[in-house]
Structure formats: C-alpha cells, structure tokens
Amino acid sequence: MCGIAGTINLNNPNLELIKNSLLHRGPDEQAIHKHKNINLIHTRLSIQDISNGHQPFEYKEYVIVFNGEIYNHLDLRQEYLRDFSFTTNSDTETLLYLYIKYQNKMFDMLDGMFAFAILNKSSNKIIFSRDRAGKKPLYVYKDSDSLMFASELNTIKAGITNLNIDEDEIYSYIRNGFFFKSKTPYKNVFEVEAGLVYEIDCQSLDIKKENYFDILDFYKKDKVNDYEHAKETLDEILHKSVKDRLLSSDLEVGAFLSGGIDSSLIVAVASEYIQNLKTFTVKFDGAFDESHLAKLTAKKYNTQHYELSISMNLKDDIEKILLNYGEPFMDSSAIPSYYVSQEAKKYVTVILNGDGADELFGGYRRYVPSANNLLSVASYFSSLTKLLPKPHNKKSIYNYAYRLLAMSGKKGLDFYNSATNDIFEDIYSFENNHTFSEMNSFINSVENENISSLSKMLYMDFNLILQSDLLKKMDIATMAHSLEGRSPFLSKYMLEFVPTLSDKYKINGKTTKYILRDLAKQYLPKELITQPKRGFEVPLKNWVENDLKDNIFDTLGSSCYSQNFIDRNFIDKLLSRALDVSDEKRAKMLWTLYTLEIFKANQ
C-alpha cells in the first residue's frame, strides 16, 4: 500500500510538501520522477517484494506510480507475460507490462485494489484508473493550465494553496451525508470514479474516459437457480479470495472481527491458512457492544484476540480524526475505525475486513421491502405518515413500519435518502441544485433498468454508500496508521458471481444475507448467525449529549458556517430539542453539521 501524487504543468510545485503529506501512506520509501513539466511522486508502504519494489517504476518510455495490490499478479505473469523479463517480484512491474501489452483490456484480468497513474513519454499522455469497487482513492485537480492528482484530498490541498469551496456540493453533502460519485467539496477537484480509465493529454489537458467495469452488467445476467451449487461455488470463491489476500504479503496479516457474520466468516476461513491469526475488535459500553460475540469466533478459531475499549476522551482526538478525510465526513463509525486501526498496527501491517458483503448479499433491513414487493403495497398507505406520530425508537417495529410507509410514497433521491441515511428527510426541505438533479437522473436510470427491485437497491448502494462512504472511511482510517486493509468480499470473483444469484438467496422472507448465513452454519457459532444486522454502530447519541456537547454547541453558535445552508431558526431548535424527532436522529443531524464546522474551520 502506498501514496501517489503527480503534477502536470503546475507552476513551482512544492514537491517536498506534497510528498510529506503522504508519508503516513508510505513511510518506508519516498521518490520523485521528473519529466519535463511532469512530476510523479510515490511514498511506499513495503508489503510485497520488500527489498526491490521501488517506485516510480520505469520501463522504456513508460513510468508508473501505483497504490494497491494485485493479488493474482504472479499467475498473470505466467499466463500472459512470458515474453517479458522481470527484474522484481513486485505487482507494480506486472501491472505496467500488462498495460503495455494489453492496454485497457488488462482490467478484466486483475483481481485487486488499485489506484495508479501511467505516463507514456512518447505519446505525452497519462492514464488514471481505480479498481472495480473503488477501494483505493484518487483525486484530481484541474484548471485550464495545470493538473494535479493525489491519493488524498489533503495532498491536493498541500499542492494547490488557493482551493475554493464548492458550496453547492456542501449543500448536497448536508442532505445526502456523502459526496456523489466524482464530487468533492472543492471547485476544480474531482474524484476518479471506480471502474473507469481516464486518459489525459499532458499538453492540452483534455480528458477522455472509458468504462471498463459496471456491476450492472452482472445483475443483468441469467440468475443462478441451483442453490446447493451456488452455495458450494460461494464457498470456493470465499476461500480463494481470502487465501489470495493472505498469501500476497511478505508481512503478517491480521483481521478485524466484529460480532457480525461477515468479518467472522473471513476469520474462520483465514484460520485455515494461518494459525493463531491476530484479530481485533472494538468494545463499547452498553447496547452497542458486540465484543462478546466476537469472542465466540476468536475462541472457536484460537485467534490471538485483541479487544480495544472505546472510552477515550473524544475532545482530544475528534478533530484530528475528522481532518484526515480532507472533507466533511459524517459516518461516525470512522471514530472506532480509527482507533482499532491504530491498535492493529502495533501488531500487523495488513488487515482483513468484511467490507462489501452487505451491499452484495443484501445485509440491511431496508432491502426486505424491495425483495418482498412491500413498497408497492405500502405506497397506498403512505399518506398515513401525516397523521401518525413520528417514531422515537430507532430499533422499534413502529419505526420500521413508519419509514416503510414514508419512503414508499417517494421517488428518486427522496426515496433513496429515506431508505438509507435518513438524516434530514421529512424534517427539512432542501432546494434543488445540479448535484441533486444528477443524483435523481442516476437513480431514475437505475429504476428504468430491467432488473429486480432488490438488484436496483443493491446496485445503487454499491455505487453510492459503499464507494462514497464505507470504503473511503476504511481507507483513511487504516492508512492514517500505515495499515493496509484488504476486503475479500470485493474480489473480482465475488463481484462477478454474487450479482448473478437469485434474489431469494439473498433475502428470504425477513432473513437478510440468506445464503451467506447458511454458509456460515458450517463455520460459526449459532449465536452469530441468528444475530440481526447492526452495522458498525456507535453510541453517537451519548457522545453528542455528553463528550461532544460543549464542542457542538460552541461550533454551532451564531456565527457558524452551517447557517449558510440550514436556516438559523432550525439549528436553534435542533440545539434546544424543540424539534419533534428522536434523540438518535437529532444526534445524526447535529453530528453532520459539526463535521462541516470542523472542515470549514481548518480551511
């Protein structure tokens, strides 16, 4: 794992400052390649071919900077690259030669996570690309005269000192809870989208884009309807995906372990290849604690289990944690993710996680109505929400029924936000802007596809929540501590197979992730398999009302930045508990605005 950056025609770039802003991503080695008006920067976290995998890597007229891992690269050498003479055992060299020989056709061969740039000095062009799911980030600043790219927004800020905030995107963030696809909080800065290749002419700075992967293509394929064969194939793919992510490291690999079946299955399979696997879990006080469930798996597989109690003083660390993202970031599970990554780094350099399973197999309760065609029935009664009292218990059946009725009468972005983040929905009215229009167009285009209602929701979440929130959270949390996170559920083989499964193998009645739970019976204690999906929940309400109360009230005072987007009277009512909302929803709204204030205060 590494950090990459580069500049094209940037006037007097401070290359040392840019490079140093990426040291946490690559503390082992740093280097810069200069060619005319182009600079390529790499900071290395040595995991594969520790002694020889130097970057930037140059071959003839080509130079590559690469962040990530190609897990099947040695197999690809044997199958496709016998006509090349290799000087290293690094996947960087494999990736470059594959591109030289096959150009964009190579992407279908790759199983890995990556963000890279390849410069062709002869054609004076450079390409950027990210992996299928978007595990590895890449941002680009572009004006009429110059261009800069980097693994993190904070590195873009280090190189471009006059960035301007895009307040339309801030407005969209407040409503949605994330930045849509390529959007960022800055003007002239975009995120390279997952599954795309960007070709840049280094003279004109013109950009051409080509899509090499869209998981929608696999949702459109004929469905697998032989259940036992499907379960057997899934087991084989899971084993291959875990094994490949274990063996493609010259350093010790551990695993995050929660009380859910996703990470527990990863640990169970990994333990077949590694004895006394090191596992790490977070312990909270009260109802949010799943550490007792994690212990069941740890005991069954005799792991070296480390339990981290989250009882820290948030005031000391919260700003530092949030600023790592370079943008407002409202997913509060970023906090325990940061601390458990910090703990894991004391013992390992590579960590496995269960990311992606929920968005592939249908792990959230909101998928149940789509799978059982309940939305169309509920839509006849959606107007009842105007008469019913608002729910105040997030986990109650009434809350579930109320939200089902509320979202069933909505379309497009209104429907999606009601079904997912539910931050300001039905509480505050937002005016339309160009990003909302783009999101509506995307959601409506998915609704028009000839796939099932469940597949539509899974596809939207894969492109929105997973890429813009969950994977971003884990990359920043781990790399802040020079820890590499690997996600077996996001392997090439999983992404191509799971969308072809019949809906009833994912949602069966009220049971989510049905086939995964069934497979887990072979590996996990019964108590884990029957547990409902909780997500990586944190006691946000307690934090907002106690540890962070003074911080939030201070930052949301009369001169706060948030009132440029949200009516001041609404903010005052939110602070004084004068709104008819649950404590949990109030906490989410306050937290969202607080993250925005932290971001703005550090511009």
Image (tube, rainbow, N blue to C red):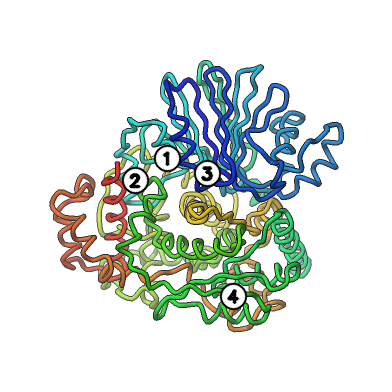
Q: Quadrant of the C terminus?
A: top left
Local crowd at mark 2 within 10 Å, few (<14), some, or many (≥20)? many
Where does residue 509 sit, x and y in percent of width and height?
A: 57, 74
Q: Which residue is mark 3?
A: 137
Q: CA distance from mark 1 to mark 4?
A: 39 Å
| Contact (Cβ within 8 Å) of mark 4 with mark 3 | no
Q: Which residue is mark 1?
A: 183
| Contact (Cβ within 8 Å) of mark 2 with mark 3 | no
Q: Amino acid at mark 4?
A: His
Q: CA distance from mark 1 to mark 3?
A: 13 Å
Looking at the image, residue 72 sits to the left or right of residue 491; the answer is: right
Where does residue 147 sit, x and y in percent of width and height?
A: 47, 26
- Badge nearest the viewer, 2 or 4: 4
| Contact (Cβ within 8 Å) of mark 1 with mark 4 | no
Q: Which residue is mark 2?
A: 172
Q: Amino acid at mark 2?
A: Ser
Q: Amino acid at mark 3?
A: Pro
- Residue 305: numbered disc: 4
Q: Earlier in the sequence, mark 1 or mark 3?
A: 3
Looking at the image, residue 428 sits to the left or right of residue 209; the answer is: left
Secondary element at tag 3: loop
Asked whether residue 131 appears in the rendered view, the answer is no
Q: CA distance from mark 1 to mark 2?
A: 10 Å
Identify the image quadrant of residue 242: bottom right
- Badge nearest the viewer, 1 or 4: 4
Looking at the image, residue 245 sits to the left or right of residue 588; the answer is: right
Identify the image quadrant of residue 348: bottom right
Which residue is more in the foreground, 202 or 248?
248
Q: Earlier in the sequence, mark 2 or mark 4?
A: 2
| Contact (Cβ within 8 Å) of mark 1 with mark 3 | no
Q: Amino acid at mark 1?
A: Lys
| Contact (Cβ within 8 Å) of mark 1 with mark 2 | yes
